[in-house]
């Protein structure tokens, strides 16, 4: 089960059955939920009392990812992106085993982490704005997503700080950043930690990336 609370007053706003949820946008009220049995995915709205709306034809899902497009992983071998209307419009299917999906702040790029690489895709803004206006085939809408960069490194996490720049943490606890469209083999190192750290996020008002270790010591 899941329960959604308001951040002000800590009030119960929504609840239901599901092993996992993923938000459409930060601060929004639209989210997807995945059933543990059958892997069915539904679109939900916090402010609605009509219940969830299952997406037709989407079952056997093992993971979901939030963002401007809904990411759905099946069998650990493919990642499919759908629009959030619930009309089952397939944007694109990629043959990749995704561990995490991270969107840039303006939605123009998406980073997909796998066991041994990081794929950065550029997003067609016209498709994102009106996916129903394009023809969708078995693999989705052509030219909706294009490979922009590939980092052949084992990354633990990614945190976007702009539309084309992200900070990442490697398995060796090295903190660095990458600019999309630059040299994929060139990294700009920020710090090296002597023990495991975890990315908390980026605070635009402070211009800082925050991390913590297992002892809850915060570093920025």
Image (spheres, rainbow, N blue to C red):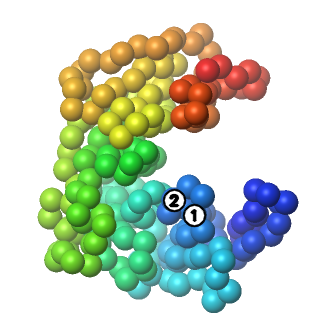
The reply to whether the C-beta atoms of the residues labelled 2 and 1 are less than 8 Å apart is: yes
Crowd class of label 1 (few under 14; some 14 to 19; many from 20; radius 10 Å) = few
Question: Residue at the location (40% across, 32% down)?
Answer: 166
Q: Does residue 36 appear in the picture of this structure?
A: no
- The residue shown at (39%, 48%) is 106
Disc 2/disc 1 C-alpha distance (Å): 5 Å
Q: Secondary structure at mark 1?
A: loop
Residue in the foreground of this view, choosing between 124 and 90: 124
Residue extending furthest bottom?
A: 50
Numbered label attached to residue 28: 1
The residue beneath circle 2 is: 25
Q: x, y (%) of residue 129?
A: 30, 67
* Image quarter (top left, top right, bottom left or bottom right) of the N terminus: bottom right
Please indicate whether residue 20 sits to the left or right of residue 40 in the image.
Answer: right
Q: Give residue 114's quadrant in the image.
A: top left
Q: Residue at x 80, y 69 (%)?
A: 12
Check the image and report above or below for 24 versus 214. below
**Residue 144, image x, y percentages:** 21, 60
């Amino acid at each position: 089960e899941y329960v959604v609370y308001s951040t002000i007053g800590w009030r119960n706003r929504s609840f239901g059955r599901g092993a996992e949820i993923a938000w459409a946008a930060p601060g929004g009220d639209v989210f997807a939920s995945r059933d543990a049995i059958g892997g069915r995915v539904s679109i939900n709205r916090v402010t609605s009392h009509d219940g969830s709306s299952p997406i037709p034809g989407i079952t056997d899902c093992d993971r979901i990812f939030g963002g401007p497009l809904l990411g759905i992983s099946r069998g650990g071998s493919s990642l499919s992106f759908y629009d959030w209307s619930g009309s089952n419009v397939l944007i694109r299917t990629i043959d990749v085993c995704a561990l995490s999906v991270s969107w840039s702040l303006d939605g123009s790029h998406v980073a997909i982490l796998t066991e041994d690489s990081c794929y950065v895709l550029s997003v067609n803004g016209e498709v994102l704005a009106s996916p129903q206006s394009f023809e969708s085939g078995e693999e989705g809408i052509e030219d909706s997503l294009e490979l922009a960069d590939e980092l052949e490194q084992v990354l633990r996490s990614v945190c976007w700080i702009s539309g084309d720049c992200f900070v990442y943490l490697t398995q060796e606890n090295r903190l660095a950043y990458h600019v999309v469209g630059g040299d994929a083999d060139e990294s700009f190192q920020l710090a090296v930690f002597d023990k495991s750290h975890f990315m908390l996020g980026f605070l635009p008002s402070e211009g800082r990336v925050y991390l913590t270790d297992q002892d809850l010591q915060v570093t920025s």
